Image (tube, coloured by chain):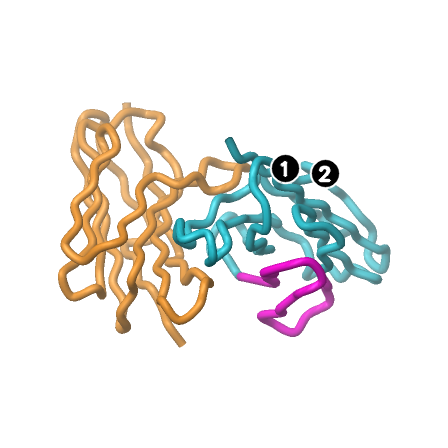
Amino acid sequence: SQTIHQWPATLVQPVGSPLSLECTVEGTSNPNLYWYRQAAGRGLQLLFYSVGIGQISSEVPQNLSASRPQDRQFILSSKKLLLSDSGFYLCAWSASRTSGSGETQYFGPGTRLLVL
Amino acid sequence: GQQLNQSPQSMFIQEGEDVSMNCTSSSIFNTWLWYKQDPGEGPVLLIALYKAGELTSNGRLTAQFGITRKDSFLNISASIPSDVGIYFCAGQHSANSKLTFGKGITLSVRP
């Protein structure tokens, strides 16, 4: 079965510091991968998605970037965190369109980021 | 852009009661999904709907894909305290793989 992991679970960082959040998926190959941010426990904002290694699409201009160095690894980064970057970051995966099994997305456990 | 409307923002029910939640859109979707999120955790998929008119159950949960493809509802029967959480609907247009999410409904169940 497929599982999705996020690391770390919680992070407190000072303003201006760098950020690296990791998401890994097991039990599937060539997944579509997504990063969402959820503010104040409500509403999911899509930040980035990727359909393959090195392929990243950005949904909104922001202080963050994403990378996909391996098929089942998705990284969310920032060079300098802002206060407004605080929130709950969720990674999700879906089967690639070529698999024919639809685009239902499955979420990871999330990373809570607090920027002080 | 596409939007999904979920209202009210919060619902309060008594344990044992049934509850129904609607999700509506101004545009057509080809997939409807319902998720539940517990505090501090990621959303968990409850039910996925892929055909207009489809009615699917998962235990005490029942969801339907509206005939017009512009709405869906989720019913929870005989609510229990662990039903507390935020319920999100999500729709997917066939043109791309991105989901459009509603803002969620926070359900509280009084024992």
Q: Mark 1 points at which residue?
A: A5
Q: Which chain carries label 1?
A: A
Measured as percent of width and height from the top left, residue A80 is found at 83, 62
Left-right relation of A94 to A89: left
Nearer the observer, A41 or B49: B49
Element class at badge 1: strand
Query: Which amino acid is tagged 2?
Result: Pro
Task: Return the residue at label 2.
Answer: A8
Inspect the image, locate mark 1, and give the three-letter code of the amino acid beneath it. Answer: His
Q: Tell me if residue B104 is in the magenta stretch.
A: no
Magenta stretch: give its range.
Answer: A46-65
Which chain does cyan denote in the image?
A
In the displayed structure, does residue A99 sit left or right of residue B65? Answer: right
Q: Which mark is residue A107?
A: none
Chain letter corresponding to the colour orange: B
Q: Position of residue A95 (x, y in %)?
A: 49, 50
Tag nearer the camera, 2 or 1: 1
Q: Which residue is located at x 20 percent, y 54 percent?
A: B65
